[in-house]
């Protein structure tokens, strides 16, 4: 089922809507947000210069830093008494970024969520457990109201207290799980330790995952452990929260609600707009936001866009799974490299542990790339031929995925450094 | 008559081998037989020890990647032709030898073999009066 007509318009019908909304948005920010007005004036662009979608590239970019500098309400385009909800995302340093919603923004948010849950296959017969943390984060509340709008029963368990989550899941007959992918894996482990097999003892059939990027290997693992269809959705609190894009049951990229979000792909180093199908940083202009409209917002997420209509019947553009953050991008021998690509390859090999390091050095003006990875403590091989085959297979996969020929160094378990928080994987010694 | 052999992965780092012997020595585990296959980069250490399960656990705890495999150990007379007879018996029975290593003590030689089917190999060899050693007999 397709929730809204806007998801299956022809390209020309859709672009007509986008142009009108783009003009409105530009006029709205020019009139009401001093920050954007100044930026546009500096570039000598006036709202009436934006007549087509192509004119988008005349407009200035905006960034998360801009939100921080204008903390808390400096980028709001409506009077404060029109704002009915505030959310904030934690900054790793200093002040959080604050986002606001008018009542219309909240209603639109629910509409967007109703679209993505419907495309993932949720129906009124389902019961959804929301294991996102309720609070300042946008995740839980966004899904909550959107699911209700779609007529689906919501169980707002929030995150944590996994044993109780599992008990309710069993007793209530929950059929859908909303959480981060890593929490779904953790929950699966706890279930097994309690003697519950999620596949047979629980009724979960569908996962709506977001809040963090994840690999195909993680998806496969979740599907295997839970016996569910694991779908992914995408959003950023700055843009609205979850609901920007979501996967349909074909799991073939995430459909962006293009009548609300106008996407571009740029080269993160130069800001140049790249043609469809090329990989680069996702930039989004919001087309329907009242409280916090953003022009050409740099998401820092690296992806690719596909404009071919999907076999599900939707015509909206699809974005590939996020393959990294533009801040994490490395350039080795002129090739763009993301640590997540390396992780994706290594995670396919059962013989390897989860810890790895990427070391880049310069020898005689040439870049050299080395990947160190730990073996699992359970050695699956017993002869040299087997070991060489494993080594060749890993090297081959790396070559195919990275387009580079790294030196591979397989090391003993527990020899690479461990980190309490976010792991340091990259050592760029150039 | 099945014997548990440990295969331990060694990065070609000096000290790695002595680390293995230290861990085992300090915990009172005897090494009865040992062989190393190595290239310029990595090494695979094969060990027969007095307590395979305990040694595996200890080595894993100390950061080694360990595999526990079933092998057999033939006891042949230290004379020309005896090893050939044993190998022929196995190959006639369609059993592949993946690798082997041997050591001679006095009149006899112990030959450790990884074969495609250990149980079948034990049966065939015993039928042909070729002597096999049990774990505790390897010294
Ligand atoms: Zn689709």
Image (cartoon, coloured by chain):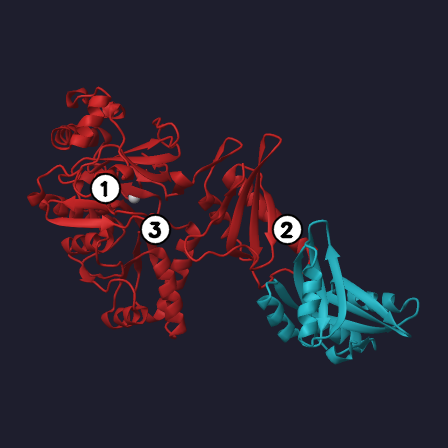
Chain colours: A red, B cyan
Provide the residue designation for mark 1.
A239
Residue at 56 percent of width and 55 percent of height: A374
- Looking at this view, is A383 or A163 the one in front? A163
Provide the residue designation for mark 3.
A212
**Residue A34 — which label?**
none
Residue at 37 percent of width and 36 percent of height: A304
Report, in whole angstroms, how far the alpha carbon at label 3 lies from the one at label 1: 16 Å
Local SS, label 2: helix
Instruction: Report the image quarter containing ligand 1.
Output: top left
Q: Give the letter of the chain under mark 3.
A: A
Name the residue furthest front.
Answer: A94
Percent of width and height locating residue B115: 72, 66
Q: Earlier in the sequence, mark 3 or mark 1?
A: 3
Question: Residue B91 falls in which quadrant of the image?
Answer: bottom right
Provide the residue designation for mark 2.
A389
Q: Earlier in the sequence, mark 3 or mark 2?
A: 3
């Amino acid at each position: 089922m397709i929730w809204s007509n806007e998801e299956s318009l022809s390209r020309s019908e859709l672009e007509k809507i986008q142009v009108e909304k783009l003009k409105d948005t530009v006029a709205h920010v020019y009139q009401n947000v001093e920050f954007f007005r100044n930026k546009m004036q500096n570039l000598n662009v006036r709202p009436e210069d934006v007549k087509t979608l192509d004119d988008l590239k005349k407009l200035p970019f905006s960034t998360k830093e801009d939100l921080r500098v204008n903390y808390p309400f400096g980028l709001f385009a409506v009077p404060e008494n029109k704002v009915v909800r505030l959310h904030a995302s934690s900054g790793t340093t200093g002040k959080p970024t604050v986002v606001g919603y008018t009542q219309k923004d909240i209603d639109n948010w629910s509409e967007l969520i109703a679209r993505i849950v419907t495309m993932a296959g949720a129906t009124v017969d389902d019961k959804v457990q929301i294991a996102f943390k309720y609070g300042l984060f946008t995740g839980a509340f966004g899904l909550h109201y959107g699911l209700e709008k779609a007529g689906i029963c919501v169980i707002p368990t929030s995150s944590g207290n996994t044993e109780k989550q599992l008990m309710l899941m069993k007793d209530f007959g929950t059929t859908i799980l909303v959480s981060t992918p890593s929490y779904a894996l953790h929950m699966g482990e706890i279930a097994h330790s309690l003697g519950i097999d999620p596949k047979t003892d629980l009724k979960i059939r569908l996962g709506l995952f977001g809040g963090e990027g994840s690999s195909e290997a993680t998806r496969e693992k979740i599907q295997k452990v839970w016996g569910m269809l694991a779908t992914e959705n995408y959003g950023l609190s700055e843009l609205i929260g979850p609901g920007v894009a979501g996967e349909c049951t074909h799991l073939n990229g995430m459909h962006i609600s293009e009548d609300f979000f106008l996407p571009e792909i740029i080269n993160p180093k130069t800001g140049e707009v790249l043609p469809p199908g090329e990989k680069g940083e996702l930039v989004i202009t919001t087309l329907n936001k009242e409280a916090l409209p953003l022009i050409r917002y740099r998401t820092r997420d690296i992806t690719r866009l596909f404009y071919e209509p999907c076999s599900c019947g939707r015509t909206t553009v699809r974005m590939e799974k996020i393959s990294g953050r533009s801040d994490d991008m490395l350039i080795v021998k002129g090739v763009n490299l993301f640590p997540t690509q390396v992780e994706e390859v290594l995670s396919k090999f059962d013989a390897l542990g989860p810890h790895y390091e990427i070391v880049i050095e310069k020898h005689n003006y040439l870049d050299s790339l080395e990947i160190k990875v730990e073996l699992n403590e359970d050695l699956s091989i017993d002869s040299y031929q087997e070991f060489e085959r494993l080594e060749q297979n890993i090297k081959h996969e790396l070559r195919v995925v990275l387009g580079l020929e790294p030196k591979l160094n397989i090391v003993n378990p527990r020899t690479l450094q461990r980190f309490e928080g976010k792991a340091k994987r990259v050592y760029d010694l150039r | 008559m099945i014997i548990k052999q440990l295969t331990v992965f060694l990065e070609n780092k000096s000290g790695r081998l002595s680390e293995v012997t230290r861990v085992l020595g300090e915990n009172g585990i005897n090494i009865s037989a040992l062989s190393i296959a190595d290239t310029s980069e990595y090494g695979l250490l094969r060990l027969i020890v007095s307590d395979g399960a305990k040694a595996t656990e200890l080595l894993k705890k100390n950061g080694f990647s360990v595999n526990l495999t079933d092998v057999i150990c033939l006891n042949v007379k230290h004379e020309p032709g005896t090893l050939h007879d044993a190998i022929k018996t196995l190959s006639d029975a369609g059993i592949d030898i993946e690798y082997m290593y041997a050591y001679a003590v006095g009149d006899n030689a112990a030959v450790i073999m990884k074969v495609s089917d250990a149980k079948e190999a034990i049966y065939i060899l015993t039928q042909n009066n070729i002597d096999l050693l049990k774990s505790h007999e390897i010294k």
